[in-house]
Image (cartoon, grey):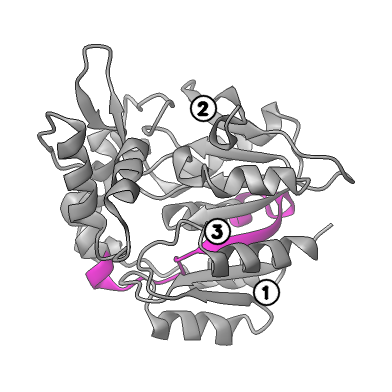
């Protein structure tokens, strides 16, 4: 069994009846510790954690890497207006209830970090600690505009070579050092091949409907109160891509000022968002988790 395949497929029901999916990595030997729940970004899925999740599991923590509704192997929502962080957070709480997980460490990339902040508001005791990956209570408008420009947009893909070229085109700014092999692997995380051989992006294009409906003003909501509630009351680690266009150096500095005890690591030469398998990110995550019971 390869490392990337060392998980079982877990299904659970959302409060409104959707069939949702998570990769469930069993913990290695050692004392029981709160599991890690890993939540991906806007257009991604649980495959984003396929490098770091097995390592965390081997260290003794169960890892549940979710496919948020509308992504990956989770159902697409009949009502696209349910593609919102508060609904996603309620879905994750349903997973915790159905899996009998009372408390967890949350590791959220981009949108996954926003969901983590929402979870803290909905059920504070569920959040033991948080790892925020290149996301904060405020985001740089230029990064959001870049993501909004491709999210939910149709793309013609006729081959895996096309898929790889697309992955590189929209993400090269974040991973300037990636090789052709890296981009091929990246494409296979964000695209899925259907039964008839067709290759398509692995998310519902309607995830962008609430963003468009809210208008430009809603692209930069003020989440500072939620961030303070999270980071001042429980251990928090902020991971920032050194050249991120979403979490600027200025925003990260203000986050650190608002939460002086928050741990921090910057991953050099990486944009939005680190994959968390970079040496600097891995070292910071394992050091952070080692101090948690």
Q: Residues within 10 Å of mark 2 (few under 14, many from 20)?
A: many
The question of residue 241 being in magenta is answered with no
The residue beneath circle 2 is 21
Secondary structure found at label 3? helix
How many angstroms separate mark 1 from mark 3 (CA)? 12 Å
Residue 270: horizontal and vertical position, in percent? Answer: 38, 69
Instruction: Tell me, yes or no, whether the highlighted magenta stretch contains residue 124.
Output: yes
Q: Residue at x 69, y 61 (%)?
A: 286
Q: Which mark is residue 232?
A: 1
Q: Is residue 87 above or below residue 79?
A: below
Query: Which residue ends up furthest to the top in the rendered image?
Result: 196
Residue 274 shown left or right of residue 181 in the figure:
right
Q: Residue at x 73, y 60 (%)?
A: 289
User: The C terminus is located in which quarter?
Assistant: bottom right
- The alpha-carbon separation of the residues under discs 2 and 1 comes to 31 Å
Q: Position of residue 188 (x, y in %)?
A: 33, 36
Residue 276 position (above or below residue 258): above
Instruction: Read off the magenta span.
Output: 120-143
> Camera-side residue: 143 or 27?
27
Between disc 2 and disc 1, whose residue precedes?
Answer: 2
On the image, which quarter does residue 15 sit in?
top right
| Mark 1 crowd level (few <14, some 14–19, many ≥20, 10 Å Cα) | some
Res 60 label: none
Name the residue beneath numbered marker 3. 117
Question: Judging from the image, what secondary structure is the residue with disc 1 in?
Answer: loop
Q: Residues at badges 2 and 1 in contact (C-beta under 8 Å)?
A: no
Residue contact between numbered discs 1 and 3, judged by CB atoms under 8 Å: no
Q: Residue at x 18, y 46 (%)?
A: 166
Pointer 3: residues within 10 angstroms few (<14), some, or many (20+)? many
**142 lies left or right of 277:** left
């Amino acid at each position: 069994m390869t490392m990337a395949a060392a998980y079982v497929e877990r299904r659970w029901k959302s409060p409104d009846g959707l069939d949702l999916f998570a990769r469930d990595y069993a913990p290695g030997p050692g004392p029981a510790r709160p599991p890690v729940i890993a939540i991906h970004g806007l257009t991604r899925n649980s495959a984003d954690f396929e490098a770091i999740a097995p390592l965390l599991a081997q260290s003794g923590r169960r890892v549940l890497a979710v496919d948020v509704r509308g992504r990956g192997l989770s159902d697409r929502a009949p009502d696209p207006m349910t593609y919102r962080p508060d609904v996603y957070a309620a879905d994750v709480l349903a997973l915790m209830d159905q899996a009998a997980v009372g408390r967890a460490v949350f590791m959220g990339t981009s949108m996954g970090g926003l969901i983590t902040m929402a979870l803290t508001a909905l059920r504070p005791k569920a959040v033991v600690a948080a790892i925020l990956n290149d996301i904060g209570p405020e985001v740089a408008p230029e990064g959001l505009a870049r993501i909004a420009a491709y999210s939910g947009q149709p793309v013609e893909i006729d081959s895996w070579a096309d898929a790889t070229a697309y992955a590189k085109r929209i993400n090269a700014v974040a991973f300037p050092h990636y090789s052709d092999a890296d981009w091929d692997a990246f494409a296979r995380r964000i695209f899925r091949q259907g039964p008839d051989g067709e290759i398509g992006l692995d998310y519902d294009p309607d995830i962008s409907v609430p963003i468009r409906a809210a208008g430009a003003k809603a692209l930069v909501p003020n989440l500072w109160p939620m961030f303070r509630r999270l980071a001042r009351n429980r251990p928090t680690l902020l991971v920032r891509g050194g050249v991120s266009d979403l979490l600027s150096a200025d925003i990260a500095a203000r986050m650190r000022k608002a939460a002086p005890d928050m741990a921090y690591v910057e991953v050099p030469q990486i944009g939005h968002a680190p994959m968390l398998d970079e040496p600097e990110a891995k070292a910071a995550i394992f050091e952070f988790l080692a101090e948690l019971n």
